Image (tube, rainbow, N blue to C red):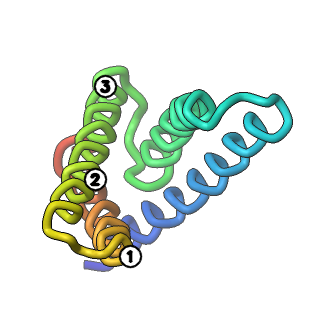
Amino acid sequence: MRKILLEGSRFFWAGVLTTVIYFGIAMFLIDVIGFNLGFSTIIAFSICLVISYVLHSGWSFKVEYSLNRFIRFTLAAILNLAVLLGISVLAESLHISNLKSVLLTCTLIPLASYLLNKIWVFR
């Protein structure tokens, strides 16, 4: 149990660090370089996908890097995005407030991401 809590904690903090880096890259590209939001988001997401993979491989789950794992990690990120969008669409159709929808996704997505990465990506 202690190992899972430690691993989950490292997963959480790696996610926080990646989010801060994402924010910095996106804002730099928008405010300094002058790129639009969409293009900046794609670039920042792509860079942070690699950073996140490196952090989770080497620190959160302590496994060796591999192309196969990176592909699974990328697919897991796409799946999480699809679930995120699905929850948003469902919330809108059920007239659930934006705040409740965002809070739901902020709770479910990290947990689902951890489980998916633990069970499938970094097994």
Quarter of the figure that contains the N terminus? bottom left
Kind of residue at disc 3: Ile
Q: Residue at x 65, y 51 (%)?
A: 23
Q: Point out the frontmost of discs 2 and 3.
A: 2
Q: Residue type at mark 1: give it.
A: Leu
For label 3, count other residues whose C-alpha is less than 10 Å away and answer few (under 14), some (14-19) or many (20+): few
Sequence order check: which comes first, mark 2 or mark 3? 3
Label 1 vs 3, first from the N-terminus: 3
Given this view, does label 2 or label 1 mark the residue nearer the observer?
1
| Residue closest to the eye, 57 or 90 | 90
Along the line of sight, which residue is nearer the eye, 45 or 51? Answer: 45
Q: Amino acid at mark 2?
A: Leu
- Real-space Cα distance between discs 1 and 3? 33 Å
Identify which residue, 109 or 66, lies in the foreground.
109
Which label lies toward us, 1 or 3? Answer: 1
Image location of residue 25, percent across then percent down: 70, 41
Residue at image point 16% right, 59% down: 90
Q: CA distance from mark 2 to mark 1?
A: 14 Å
Q: Is residue 122 left or right of residue 35?
A: left
Q: Quadrant of the C terminus?
A: top left
Residue on which disc 2 sits: 84
In this rendering, is residue 55 above or below 88? above
The residue tagged with tag 2: helix, strand or loop?
Answer: helix
Question: Is mark 2 in CB contact (under 8 Å) with mark 1?
Answer: no
Q: CA distance from mark 2 to mark 3?
A: 20 Å
Q: Residue 99: which disc?
A: 1
Q: Position of residue 114 (x, y in %)?
A: 29, 58
Q: Position of residue 113 (x, y in %)?
A: 29, 55
Where disc 3 sits, the SS reads helix
Q: Residue at x 36, y 70 (%)?
A: 98
What residue sits right under mark 3 in the picture?
A: 71
